[in-house]
Image (cartoon, rainbow, N blue to C red):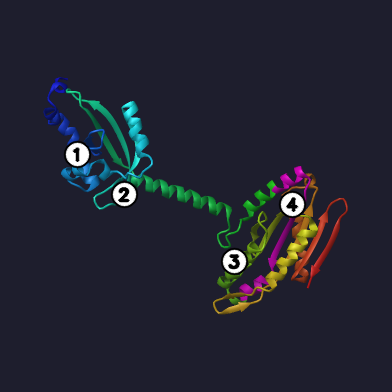
Amino acid sequence: MDWINQKPDTFLERDFYQLLFENSMDAILLTKPDGRIFRANPAACQLFQMTEEEICQAGRTGLVDMSDPRLLPAVRERSETGKTRTELTYIRKDQSRFEAECASALFTDIVGETWSVMIIRDISSFKQIEQELRSAHQDASYFATYDDLTKVLNRRSFVEQLAQIMNHASSEGSQMTLILTDIDHFKRINDQYGHQFGDHVLIHFANELAANIRPGDFLGRYGGDEFIICLPDTNLKNGVQITERLRQLIEKSPVIADTQTIQLTASFGVTASIRYADEGTDLIISRVDKLLYQAKEMRNCVVFDLLSNDDATGQTDR
């Protein structure tokens, strides 16, 4: 260990040190705590796209994004504990920025001068992969929740939310209205205009429904051209009024796509219940499905009932 007792200039030129310094795949900088840089290895030159002289001239302020909020805490930690490890944003010669992990430690040479060594590893590719994985996870989560074509909740997600609303309504003793609807003569539209136009019709229908329900209500695609709407904290009377308004809006909103314009109508089944302890999502959906079936026999109308101590049924149409 007699190399420690050599003069600083000799210390910097030791053969074993040069071997480690020059062959490291990570960037190594020999610096002063104030940010001055005295040596940079070849990996650092390659990383920053600068010569060693340019790196030394640039100093810390020329290599590190000084606005990075992680910088000052890292400098403070190194000053207090003698070492730090953090991720920072660095700047290449062409001013492009990249993420890198930096490990830095303070040490004192034989004459009592304090130095710092910085080992910098480019992690920008890992950050990109991390972002891509995060994005893929978000995409997977989105597609597991929403219908790809119409961008409303898919059937599974809607039923899950419906179950939560029913549990809440049961504990609060409140009512909830459920609406099931589909487009009148949709098969005829598909056959006459083609499936691509049929997709436009489904998107238009979903958009009209979504734009005209209240905050807190939620909409899902139940299957094919069937869409389902939950109106929390809504009794049957108000639910039927909302449904009738939706029916009229659909009737007055033509679909225009590919130079084709058609007028839509839709049929609606509506139900509400306060007896959630006696039924789950399957039973209430089954009820509203039967009501929609009755509405489809007449087309462009609303058929409703209420399962309570006093059953009630009815319909509204043009």
Q: Look at label 1 and name its amino acid.
A: Asn
Decide which of tag 3 and tag 2 comes sooner along the chain: 2
Position of residue 189 measured from the top left corner of the image (x, y, whole percent) = 63, 74
Q: Which of marks 2 and 1 is nearer the N terminus?
A: 1
| Residue position marked by numbered label 4 in the rendering | 233
Of the image marks 4 and 3, the number of the one nearer the N terminus? 3
Do the residues bearing badges 2 and 1 touch, measured as CB atoms within 8 Å?
no
Mark 4 to mark 3: distance in Å? 27 Å
Q: How far apart are marks 4 and 1 (CA)?
A: 68 Å
Specify the label residue 79 is tagged with. Answer: none
Under circle 1, the secondary element is loop
Rounded to the nearest angstrom, the CA distance separating label 2 from label 1 is 20 Å
Label 1 belongs to which residue? Answer: 41
What stretch of residues is rendered in magenta? 165-191
Q: Which of marks 4 and 3 is in front?
A: 4
Find out whether residue 188 is within the magenta segment: yes
Do the numbered discs 3 and 2 sit on residues whose CB atoms are within 8 Å?
A: no
Which circle's residue, 2 or 4, is located before the other in the chain?
2
Foreground of the two, 108 or 20: 108
Find the distance from the CA under tag 1 to the CA under tag 3. Answer: 59 Å
Tell which tag, 1 or 3, sits nearer the viewer.
Answer: 1
